[in-house]
Every structure is written in structure tokens, then in C-alpha cells.
Image: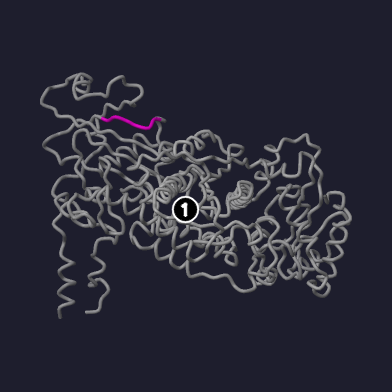
Amino acid sequence: MCDATDSPAMELPPKGRAEGARSKLCLKCKTAKPSITIRRSLYCKDCFVRASVSKFRSALSKSRKRMPASRAQVMVALSGGATSSAMLQLMADYQRMELKGFAAEPTYTGVVVGHVDESALFSGYSDSQICDIATAIGVECHVARLEDVFTLGGDQAALLELVHATIAPGTTRDQFCVQLARGDGSTPAREQLRALFAGLGSATDREDMLDIIKSFLLAQLARQAQCGLLLLGDSGTRIASKLVSLTSRGRGFSLPLEAGAEAPFLGSSSGVTAYRPMRDFIMKEIAFFNLWTAQPSVVVPTFTTGAPETASIDRLTEAFVVGLDRDFCSTVSTVCRTVQKLELRPDALTAAQCIICSMPAEASAQAWRNRLTVNVAPKDQTLEQVAVSSADVQPPQSTFDVTAHLCYSCQSLLHFAKPGVALPAFCLQNYREQIAGAKPSDSESDVGAHLQQSQERLRQQIEEFFI
Amino acid sequence: MSSIETGKHYNQPASNLTDKVPPVDTRKYFDAVTKSLSKAKEPPTAKDAVSSQPDGSSVKSYLHIITKYTSGMELLIKDKELGLDHVFEVNPKAAPLNMKDLIKYIGETHVLEGKQSAFTRDETICPGIMVIINECDWEVMDELDYVLKNDDTIEFISTLHGG
């Protein structure tokens, strides 16, 4: 009687399908025939577009209530993809409404677009197409190029170059040694950028690094344009898959900053607040919104475009979330609500920032790794020998150990990178700021003493770069 | 007990009309005249299709379908065009052509070699690809069971990150 096969649920149609939808009417106006079903609710074209507009407005005002940003210009981060294009149109509409309204002054002084041109890595589209999307809506477009991260301090600026990275189970400290390398100005920035991505271990690492570089450039663009608020086009579907992929990449510590509805962008020191007002939209809504409002968008390729699902962690989690959401239509919204409940741990607020990704770096990354890392020891060595031999390796005099300045995820990123990879210029800037700001009282025991020594050496070496 | 009765009710085999007709051999049906929109000066008509048949007899009926591929779907399609015109020969005695047949046909004929798994899975479209029939969500149009009509426009939109 209690046999599972007798359960009525087994024979029910998959959730999310609107059965007999053609005979029903739109949920809102109750007069028109439905054109779309969102989570089993039926809408006609007009009602759907109207509902999307009001959903965006309420998402934006909710974010503003929870985390007020300075009354300044807004920068819309536009990659050219479907979500950011839809967001730009919705934001321009919001601003128009404010200007038309009876409010004494609009909430935001202006709207501009920030775009990071990725043509150095991907062909097939041009940034003029994206600027066209912005100009069609009537907003100014600020463009940064990916390769700019290598020329921040001039053509011949020094960069941090990875010498070796060691992760060994059982050791007391992992080692990530870098050295200063001064470019001779002969290698174009584009080539340096390509060399960086070619030197990374996997598609997941490359996507990670691309995200980091894009975030840095967007923060810089926002500061240059004096925008206190940055709107990021992460759809609900994207946030749900980000939750899974960031966690599995070891970014759980900084997850609320990277996927929350509103958060200080790249650390509170940047002075930029990020909102993600598209988080209430699933990709299906965005696709139909763009179709019915004739909003153009561009296909922005990634490292895994056209690749199988297993090409990277991002791709795999996206396929997982999208597949689940098709059969169980509330998957994305449930996961998004969970993300919204996440809060930073108190020690994350005071933790040192990672010099690569600018996210809080958990101090106990080493302890985690010692418990979790699975490595294959060479056949003729026991585990103890591996641990001893790797602990014995002392960094050469000209190199610095930056392990304490890296978050868990960026440590994994560097572990699989080829030695000799030059990191973007902002890594050195961040490192220099941290060294300059480090107080001796922060250091602990021998680790601290070691760190101080290397900091002292670095200070001597880079003295000439201080302005 | 009422709950068990409910269970029995759901376990009864659904009266499915498609069970009564023989399985459709799409290759045989889709004797298609496929032209890309940019190459053809005018969209092909049923008349063109008739004249392209060597033994074309006037009793045959034809179905004209337009398919479009955007937001990354064009990367999966052999002809790098945004739209394709299809004219299918229809046998009035057989089961009418539905979306299931069309998706199978496109997957076999127009999708690049090795990319089929990114287009179809388990006889339906992959998750993450939106299917739009005449500007309407296919989920309100019976999905795979939608019977194709003359001059229908079917649009495929990828919503995956990076296409």
C-alpha cells in the first residue's frame, strides 16, 4: 500500500509545465491569450513586459533601502550579452521615469555604461557593436581593454612573476614565490595578456582570472567616471550557478560579496557599491524580454563557448542548474533566496585582501588544504619525505613568498599555473599597498618574522617605484 | 482510502493519440528544399518545391517553415545564417508533423557534426535553449506535440553563458 510505485507524484507531469495553457488566459489582464509561462504562471506579451519593468524598479529600490549608495552617477556594466543589454534598457527606463516624475531630484544623477573589451582574447565581435547598444539608448560608453591591466604603471612597469608554487600535504606552509620582473617594453600588452592565460592550468582557472581582471577594470572605470554605484548583470540563473561554482572553486569565504544582491565592490576600500538588480529574472524572462522589446545583444564568447559541459566548473554547474530548473521551475529562485541569506563571517570583514582577486583571504587556508588536498606522491617517496623535501626548499633571495596574501582559491589558481607567468600589474599594486600598510604588531611568531624579512627585502627592492 | 484511489487514477495509461500511428521516419518525410534566406532572392514557395520534384504531382501538399537561430545558437548551425527556410512534403495520410519531428530533423541535418549533443537530448531540446513558435513560448503551445502549420516561424535562442 505504501509502495513507491503507487505514489501519484511519480505519474505527475514534470513541474513547470503549464498544462492546457492554450485554453487559459493571461494571469494579469485576464483578457489576452498567454504568450509565455514563467514558473507556471501565464502572461501575455504586454503584461509580461510591464511586469518585468516593475520588477526591475522594485529590485533597485529594495537594494537601495538595504544598502544606500552615494547619490552619484550609476555605471551599468555592459558586456553586450542578453542580461546586461536588458538591464541597460531597464535602467535607462528607470532614469527616464525619475526625470519625468514629480520628485524634487532624481535618485541618480546620471547613467553611464562601462564595458570591458575582450577582443584581445576572443574574436567574433567588436566593441563598436556594444557601444552601438549604448548609444542607441542614449548613454555614454566608457571602455577599458583587458590588456590595460599590464600597462597601469606605464609600458616598462614592474610585474610580479610567479617563480614556483608548491602545495604539499602535511607541510606547515605552502609556498608561492614570486619575483619582480621589469618589462622591457618590447612585448605588447596583448601578448602579455595572452601569455598569462596560456600559462594557467585549466579552463576553470582561465575563467576565474578573466572574472578577476574584468572586476578590477570595472571598478577602475567606475572610479574614473565618478560612479559610486555599479550595476552588474547577473541573472538569477547565473547567480544560482555562481553559488555552486564559486563554492566548489573554494570561494565560499567571500561568496556573499561575489553573489549577493548588493555588496561593496572589490572590498570596501574601492568606494564602489555593486547592485545585482537582474537577480529576480531567470534567463528565460530575459530572452523573451529582449525578443519582445527588440533589444539587441551580442554573443560574447567565453573560454568554453561550444565546448562540452565538462569543459569547466562554471559550464558544468550552469548545465546542472539549467537542467534542474527545466524540470523543477522554482530551482533558481530557491537558490537565489539562499544566496540572499548568506552573510560574511565577522573575520572576513577584517581579513587581509587577496592581492589577486581583492577578496578577503581566509587566514586558515593552509589548515584547510592540509586536511583536504589530495596529491600523488612519487612512487619512491613516502608522504613524509615529500613533506620534508618541499618544506626544505628555501626561496632564493630575490623572491618573495606571497602565500599569506593569497586567498584559498587564488592559491589553487597559481598552483596549476606555469612558472614564469607574469601577473597583472594590479597584483603588485595591491601587494605594495599591503606591505606599506602592514604593522609589525600584526605578525605572529616565526611566520610573522619570516614575512617581515621578506617585506623588508621587498621594500628595499621596490623603493624606487614609490612615487 | 482516497489517496490510494488517487494513485490508481494516475497509474492508468494515458490515452495517447501518437501511440496509434506508426513511428514517423523523419528522413523520408523531410524531403526538404532548404535554402538560406540570404541566398534566395525570394522565400521559396510551395510552387518552387513542386517544380524541384522530378515526378511532382499536384496532389502533394507542402509545408513551409522558417527557423531562426540567435544568441549563440547560430554557432551550432552548419549554414552560418540567422534564418533558414524549409519546405517539407507532407503525406496527408500520415500523422501530422510536430515539433518533435522538426527538432529531430534539424538536429540530424543542420547542426554541425559533433554539436548534436548541445542541441538535442533525450529526443527533446537541450535545457537552456528557448524555443519560440510564432513569437510565443513553446511551453504554452504544447511543446513537442505542437503540430506545425504553414508559414510557422520557429526561433531557437540560447540562454547559456557565452552561447
Q: Is residue A320 visible?
A: no
In-front residue for pair A381/A400? A400
Residue at left offset 37%, top offset 58%: A325
Q: Is residue A336 visible?
A: yes
Q: Main secondary structure of the magenta part?
A: strand
* Magenta run includes residue B83: yes
**Residue A348 part of the magenta segment:** no
Q: Amino acid at mark 1?
A: Pro
- Quadrant for residue A59, please give it: bottom left
Position of A70 compared to A165: left or right?
left
| Residue at left offset 66%, top offset 41% | A147
Disc 1 marks which residue?
Answer: A106
Specify start and end residues of the magenta stretch as a single range.
B81-86
Front residue of B149/B144: it is B149
Question: In the image, residue A301 lies at what x, y percent?
Answer: 51, 41
Residue A142 at x, y percent in the picture: 58, 41
Using the image, determine if residue B63 lies above or below residue A78: above
Point 60% across, 67% down: residue = A253
Residue B120, horizontal then vertical, whole percent? 35, 46
> Residue B68: percent from the left, percent from the top?
33, 36
Q: Is residue A1 left or right of residue A153?
A: left
A452 and B43: which one is in front? A452
Q: Nearer the viewer, residue A57 or A363?
A: A57
Chain holding disc 1: A
Disc 1 residue crowd, few under 14, some 14–19, many 20+, Cα 10 Å: some
Q: Which image quadrant is residue B5 in? A: bottom left
- Name the element at disc 1: loop
* Residue displayed at 39% across by 62% down: A333
Q: Which quarter of the rendered picture does the N terminus of chain A lie within? A: bottom left
